[in-house]
Image: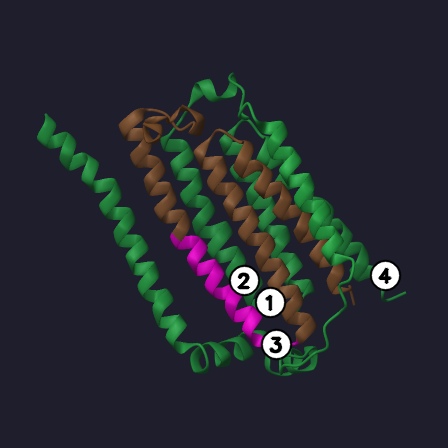
Amino acid sequence: MIPVSWYLVLTLFLFAIGAFGFIARRNVIIMLMCIEIMLNAVNVTLVALGRGLAHTTAHVLVFFIIAVAAAEAAIGLALVVLLFKKTREIHMDEFRTLKG
Amino acid sequence: MEGLLPKIVFIYLAVVLVVTSLLVVTNRNAVHAVLWMLVMFLHQAVLFITLDAEFLAAVQIIVYAGAVLVLFLFVVYMINLRTELKIHNFTVFWPAALFVSVALVILAAQALKDFRAPQPVGDMTPEAIAKVGHAKLLGKALFTEHILSFETVGVLLLVAVLGAVVLTRRIRMIRGEGL
């Protein structure tokens, strides 16, 4: 079988790519997609470690993470639509109203 | 010889996952990014299957590829920015973001150096999965040990749906009053 550490290295790279995209991209929709990439990297980590430990809790946790990610995507995209309706803009560096 | 095929499959999946996630991050066109993400999620479902988690693979395809990505695609179509293809898609401080990501990889790789494979302690062994199935094992744990969390997640999904409806509805009412 494939060693667990291979999965950990792969998910480390996936998480780093998602984090880079979240910090560096301007488009809010792509930023939400980068959050999904990071969540998926964590999911693969949990399943790999759960297989290594032969424990069900990791799999249950992944199940819950998928549910929470779906809720987060719904709310986040609703906020994006709201933001676009109000300002006609979805680029994150254009929003300066919170700066005061 | 039989140990070689899973490794080839894993390396293929790893390469595709990394390349598609890089394409998602760097793509100018949001529709293309969503479609690359679909490829990524399908390959990730196969990765779950290589980890004996076939129920989670099915959930991954149904929830992520089926529901979440369609939601993303609808929003991308609603917010159709033609100018997006011409302007730069990274913020001015993207080198700093690159530095942070590379530093994260280096630090976590240092931590992973001492990683030792864990000993199996639970009851979800490959033999048990082959005998009774992954979905049954997961369902048994879900509906006995984690039933309270399960109910809470149901309430959370309800709140998310209501929140999405309320958020997108309020602006129409304000606009109606304003007119």
- Look at mark 3 in the image and give the residue it sits on: A55
Q: Residue drawn at (20%, 35%), measured in percent from left and top?
A: B171
| Mark 1 residue crowding within 10 angstroms, few (<14) / some (14–19) / many (20+) | some
Chain at tag 4: B
* Depicted A39 relative to depicted B32: above or below: below
Relative horizontal placement of residue B32, taking residue B146 as reference (left or right): right
Amino acid type at mark 4 = Leu
Q: Where are the magenta residues, as a range?
A: A54-71
Q: CA distance from mark 2 to mark 3?
A: 19 Å
Q: Residue drawn at (58%, 75%), measured in percent from left and top?
A: B134
Disc 3 on helix, strand or loop?
loop
Q: Which mark is residue B75?
A: none
- Look at mark 1 in the image and give the residue it sits on: B54
Q: Quadrant of residue B9?
A: bottom right
Q: CA distance from mark 3 to mark 4?
A: 26 Å
Q: Nearer the viewer, mark 3 or mark 4?
A: 3
